[in-house]
Amino acid sequence: MKAEGRRRYLVLCVHPEAGRPEPRQVFEEVRRWVGRLHGEQGLSLSSLALASEDPLIVRCSSRYVDMVRAAVAALREVGGLACMVHVAKASGTLKRAMRAASASRRGAEAKLEGVVASRLGPGSR
């Protein structure tokens, strides 16, 4: 397989201050920021596409992963909601990206349970 045909799948995590932005809105903001930072040519070369809405996974060309990561890091607001967006995992296949997203989601839920249990005190389970 040629290098220009390789794709990468980026699992995105969105941490809003309040509310929950739509996955498509987040993708459109990432797309807008790639264009803003790297121009129309950069947007075209990155081959940016929405691979999955739940979990939020975007697909891009392997050569331009850093360009897309920079755009994700630049996001501060989505649909009028202040939020932080970051790349949780980069993968070469959609299947592995989905697996990584579900594992990180389970890990976050377990961490949250531990925090709640520690705040409620012993014997609260």
Image (cartoon, rainbow, N blue to C red):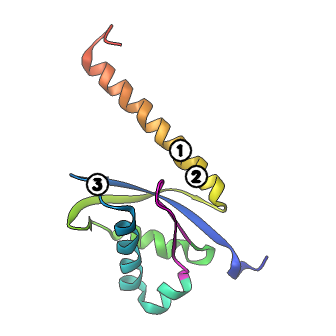
Find numbered disc 1 in the image and state the secondary structure of the residue it sits on. helix
Residue at mark 3 to residue at mark 1: CA–CA distance = 19 Å
Location of the C terminus by quadrant is top left
Q: How many marks?
A: 3
Local packing at callout 3 (Cα closer than 10 Å; few below 14, some 14-19, many 20+) is few
Res. 20 mark = 3
Find numbered disc 2 in the image and state the secondary structure of the residue it sits on. helix
Q: Report x, y in % for residue 66.
A: 51, 72
Circles 1 and 2: CB atoms closer than 8 Å: yes
Disc 2 marks a residue whose amino acid type is Met
Circles 3 and 1: CB atoms closer than 8 Å: no
Q: Report x, y in % for residue 93.
A: 66, 60
Quadrant for residue 21, please give it: bottom left
73 vs 99: above or below: below
Residue 96 horizontal side relative to residue 76, left or right: right
Find numbered disc 3 in the image and state the secondary structure of the residue it sits on. loop
Q: Hey, which residue is sitting farthest top in the picture?
A: 123
Disc 3 marks a residue whose amino acid type is Arg
Residue name at image x 47 percent, y 54 percent: 54
103 vs 27: above or below: above
What are the residue bounds of the magenta stretch?
A: 46-59
Magenta stretch contains residue 109: no
Local packing at callout 2 (Cα closer than 10 Å; few below 14, some 14-19, many 20+) is many
Residue at mark 3 to residue at mark 2: CA–CA distance = 20 Å
Residue under numbered circle 2: 98
Residue name at image x 47 percent, y 73 percent: 68
- Looking at the image, tell me whether mark 3 or mark 2 is earlier in sequence order: 3
Residue under numbered circle 1: 102
- Looking at the image, tell me whether mark 3 or mark 1 is earlier in sequence order: 3
Q: Report x, y in % for residue 51.
A: 54, 66
Local packing at callout 1 (Cα closer than 10 Å; few below 14, some 14-19, many 20+) is some
